[in-house]
Amino acid sequence: MIWLDVLVQGILLGGLYALFAAGLSLVFGIMRLVNLAHGDLIVFAAFAILLITATFGLNPFLAALIAAPLMFAAGWALQRFVLNRVLGKDILPPLLCTFGLSVALQNGMLEAFSADSQRLSVGPLESASIDLGPVTVGTLPLLTFASAVAAIFVLNRIFYTTALGRAFRAVSDDPTTASLMGLDPKSVFAIATGLAMVIVTLAALYLGVRANFDPSIGPARLLYAFQAVIIGGLGSLWGTLAGGAIIGVAQTFGAQINPEWQILAGHIAFLIVLLIRPRGLFPRAVD
Amino acid sequence: MALLSTHGLTAQYGQFKALFGVDLHVDPGECVAIIGANGAGKTTLMRSITGVLRNAPEMILHNGTPIGALPADQILQRGIAMVPEGRKLFPSLSVEENLLIGGQVRKGSGRWSLNEIYALFPILKDRRHSPGTALSGGQQQMVAIGRALMSNPGLLLCDEISLGLAPVVIRDIYAALPAIRATGAAVIVVEQDISRALAVADRVYCMMEGRVTLTAPAKDVTREAIHAAYFGAAA
Amino acid sequence: MHQVTTRTRASTIAGIAALALIAVGLILPAFAPRSLIQDLFFILTMLTLAQLWNLIAGFGGMVSVGQQAFVGIGAYALFAGVILWGWDPVPAILLGGLAAFLLAIPTAFFAFRLAGAYFAIGTWVIAEVTRLLIAQWKTLGGGTGTSLPREATSDIIGVEAIANLFGLRDAAARDVLAYWLALALAVATMAAIYALLRSRTGLALAAVRDNDNAAQSVGVDARRVKWLVFLAAATMTGLVGALIFMQTARISPDAGFSLTNWTAYVVFITVIGGIGRLEGPILGVLVFWGLQTAFADYGSWYLLALGLLAIATMLFAPRGLWGLIADRWGIALFPVQRRLILEGAKDG
Ligand SMILES: Nc1ncnc2c1ncn2[C@@H]1O[C@H](COP(=O)(O)OP(=O)(O)OP(=O)(O)O)[C@@H](O)[C@H]1O
Ligand SMILES: [Mg+2]
């Protein structure tokens, strides 16, 4: 029965990774931009929540509600004032910009918050669990997974049924023609990055309540997010959930065998999928 | 006052100069045709007017206001819409979404709505949920025209809407022109087919190698004059 | 009459100056203080790493952020050779190149499958996997790492000769040896890159960088060129990694596979100096060394500033410092762009 338990834990962990991945996938889908600072932005959002929690004595869930619009603004400004200026045919400038941002953010946070591990405290909820017959699962992991499903559902609705989503798809197809429709691709990009930062805030909330975090852990989150995106298939938001689950299951199984193998097992699972399904599990026709 | 006018308009792609001082004007409600051989600079002219290529502000006036340096999205908001060469439908959007995105930043209330477009091109209503690019060439052109109309433009630019289409289909498409003009909109049609251009337009401009070589009312322009303007040969 | 040339007057002068510099570099240990030799070792190894990264990213369009994989594996191969098989450290450097070459094959295989910018993270994943695997290698110290044994470092080939030649103590002589090797690697790398860029393959690489599809349609086998360049750069990076850690004589997975030291610094050097040109990393490494000497004590503030500087460079001077200089005065020391010279154009 232990393996069933490990499997369920892994899938639920995948929910967290899908949350990491959704923002990355959204931004790449719309503007072909890979944000190498994505993981550090997640950690940054976690510190923002921590700061709000500490300053106003709020519950982290409420604090995240306040942090989300702030992160939206930060993402919007980052896109508007930095990334839009380097976006173009050449993929090098935006990559190097976000790489610089990654290093700057990590070290800025190190100065501001020190290298100490932090955690968002949600009281008894941390240890609560639900009995599901054959397995008992933690309430928080379950909540994380449910939030990931909800977030991806909402993102998909936005993408495929709203005017904003239409604008996202149009600028992604052809920014010049989109501008002939009265859209300003650069402001659409800024909104997209802002939206991605809202998802990042949600991811940061669960990152912080489930485990310790410190300024150095961003890059690893970027790698998990990236792996979930690639396994899922570029452009497929539901795919990131499957991708996250695969990484999560591989990690929990690896850890079960030998705690030192947890991270390695996730990476190996990714490489195996890349080997046999280079376009991921649910590739979109275009791209 | 002219609805739109260009003054010594120039344009270039990198080092390559494509327009050398184009002067043109369109009056309210007028239909102007632009003809010229391949590479004459017609599309470049359209791209300059619509802000895809930027110019000095004073090179293009709209109701007397300089708009030459405005970006494309602001040009559209001033009521100048374009049906681009090659249709350029958004592949990720359905037919209806392609139309809706054209009306996303509508200017005030005007004649055109989804239902009006479907009345103009009934076939589109049946195909409204197909991807825009899954339609025939003629149907795609109808979507492209409908998409531009959805913003209720005061000036509509049509760049080679007959390109690559069968004669009957071209006829169907041009049949929509009177309804469009009935809204009071002025129209610029770029057209390779000279007789069709002369048939629909009030006035024609002929371009050659980045310059306007002829401008005349459509009804009293002669074949010889066009021949000379088109090919640059001594008439 | 016309001919295609890449030579400019500045380049001829630069060529002569470079030869003179190399000669000075060779005899420098005879009179330079030990600290200068150590600084130059640092500058030369970072320069070589930057030139190699510039080759794949700047000239080849393959933005790798996983070059630490090759530094680390190269270093570990040297340690394995010395500790496990009793090799002398100097020939063991070659093991580093070999190991990096072997690692580059699966790296390229996986990373080339990833679209555009995702290539970058793909290389990063491989570097992480390698680091985690190496950390499992218990005989080389596992996660905490290990040091070169005293016996091995005390009688490295050539050290005694150098010690006698310059009248130095062993430790200083080891620095001289490492410095000469770094100089040799730097010169060889830059000469090879220069030659490559001026060859047909260099043209092909430019075509690949600008547009994969277009390159294919003019008959350039884009995949082959990318593989070739990536493997060659990885091999050289492995050699440099082995040399660096031969000098440090101590290794751990975190140091060997450090993203900051072997990729971030290298990226900043190239970007700030000027990416996509040979002069860039040279200027960049000097600026970097200056910054490092002045501000490295500020720790994370320093890195924060470097990151912001890289962003500012991309925003305001995307071709780096050398780009600014070249625009201002139109000079190119190592020109790789072809210019058409029309002789007798005046009377033609
Ligand atoms: N994107 C571009 N980059 C470089 N040159 C261009 C570009 N677009 C057009 N040109 C050049 O500008 C000139 C004018 O082109 P333009 O497309 O405006 O001609 P046109 O009159 O619309 O021709 P056609 O009837 O074939 O559509 C041509 O010589 C063309 O080669
Ligand atoms: Mg044209």
Image (cartoon, rainbow, N blue to C red):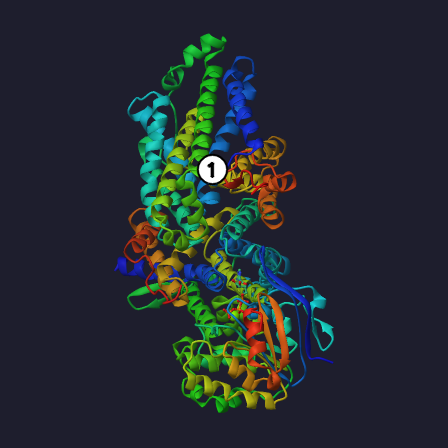
Q: Quadrant of residue C177?
A: top left
Residue type, label 1: Trp
Residue C88 appears left or right of A198: left
Q: Work out which quarter of the rendered image holds the N terminus of chain A and state it.
A: bottom left
**Residue at the (56%, 24%) spot, across then down:** C17
Tell me the subunit letter for badge 1.
C
Q: Is residue A267 visible?
A: yes
C85 w.r.t. B8: above or below: above
Q: Residue at x 34, y 60 (%)?
A: A280
Q: Nearer the viewer, residue A52 or A240?
A: A240
Q: Nearer the viewer, residue A46 or C122?
A: C122
Locate residue C181, reporting x and y percent: 44, 23
Image location of residue B66, percent across then percent down = 72, 70
Side of C311 relative to C62 (left or right): right
Give SS at disc 1: helix
Res B51 visible? no
| Image vertical order of residue A252 relative to residue A130, above or below | above
Nearer to me, B80 or B206: B206
Q: Which residue is mark 1?
A: C262
